[in-house]
Amino acid sequence: MKNIIYNKSKFIILEGLDGSGKTHACQLIKKILEKYKIPHIVIREPGGTPLAEKIRNLIKNFYTYEIINQKTILLLVYASRMQLIQNIIAPALKNNIWVISDRYELSSFAYQGGGFKIKKELIIFLKKIIVKSYLPDLTIYLDIIPKYALHRMIKRGKLDTIENNNINFFQRTRNTYLHLISKNKNSLTINANLKIDIVHQDIKNKLKKWLRTCKIYGTRG
Ligand code: TYD
């Protein structure tokens, strides 16, 4: 077998509603990269650094009588993202280490923009000053209908602050995902309504096909 040389580290994102199966899909992608001997790290958003994990906890488990302005949550999400880019993503990509992330900024457009109806201009502004050129090479979107997603969330146990929203919220979030994914040529859509082994086979096939488009063959070293 020829050695495989990847000319540049890649940044791969998993996206989808809560309950769409992203976390298992990340593990599957990790296994595939291991098989190809591609150095990589797996991270999640919000979170991924000690400070960002504290922000994650605040966002997911904040039960209070205080009225929460969703723009505050948006700013917290971007604060977490800033830490993650600066301390983890940028150094990894610079050192030829691939990055797989369970969510990234498409989640902000879908959840804060679509679900919570924050104007997209504000999110685009934050993206310009924080994300800059750290854009994904590939986004794998796991599409699931909100009814199934909610069913899986409830089966998993206690709902967190965001999961606690109603089906209309998840419908708006999904619609935004679908709209943005349809305009994103660096993306793959997976039907996540199906059984897990069918979903995983689809991810494997599509990812392997994509990997073939970004590698060059030769002798290592
Ligand atoms: P999630 O990734 O689904 O983790 P778990 O499987 O442990 O529940 O949880 C992250 C939550 O954060 C999810 O409800 C979506 C939300 N979120 C946003 O609202 N905006 C964002 O930009 C990001 C990255 C996440």
Image: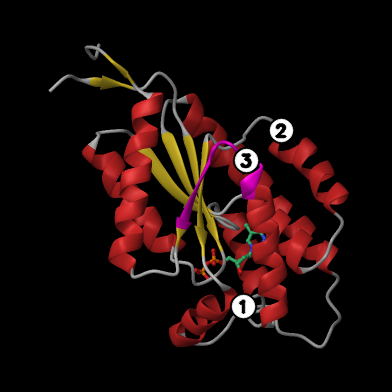
Ligand 1 is in which quadrant of the figure? Answer: bottom right
Quarter placement of the C terminus: top left
The residue lying at 34 percent from left, 53 percent from top is: 202
* Disc nearer the start of the sequence (3/1): 1
Q: Mark 1 points at which residue?
A: 163
Splitting the image into 4 quarters, where does residue 51 fall?
Answer: bottom right
Q: Mark 2 points at which residue?
A: 132
- 188 falls in the magenta region: yes
Q: Mark 3 points at which residue?
A: 184
Q: Is residue 127 left or right of residue 221?
A: right
Decide which of 3, 126 is in the foreground and name it. Answer: 3
* Disc nearer the start of the sequence (2/1): 2
Rendered view: 140 above or below 217: below
Q: Is residue 130 left or right of residue 66?
A: left
Q: Are marks 2 and 1 in contact (CB under 8 Å)?
A: no
Q: How far apart are marks 3 and 1 (CA)?
A: 26 Å
The residue lying at 65 percent from left, 51 percent from top is: 106
Q: In this view, does 186 lie to the left or right of 210?
A: right
Q: Is mark 3 on a helix, strand or loop?
A: loop
Q: Are marks 3 and 1 in contact (CB under 8 Å)?
A: no
What residue range appears in magenta? 181-190
Extreme left residue here?
1
Query: Residue 26's x, y, as percent?
Result: 40, 54
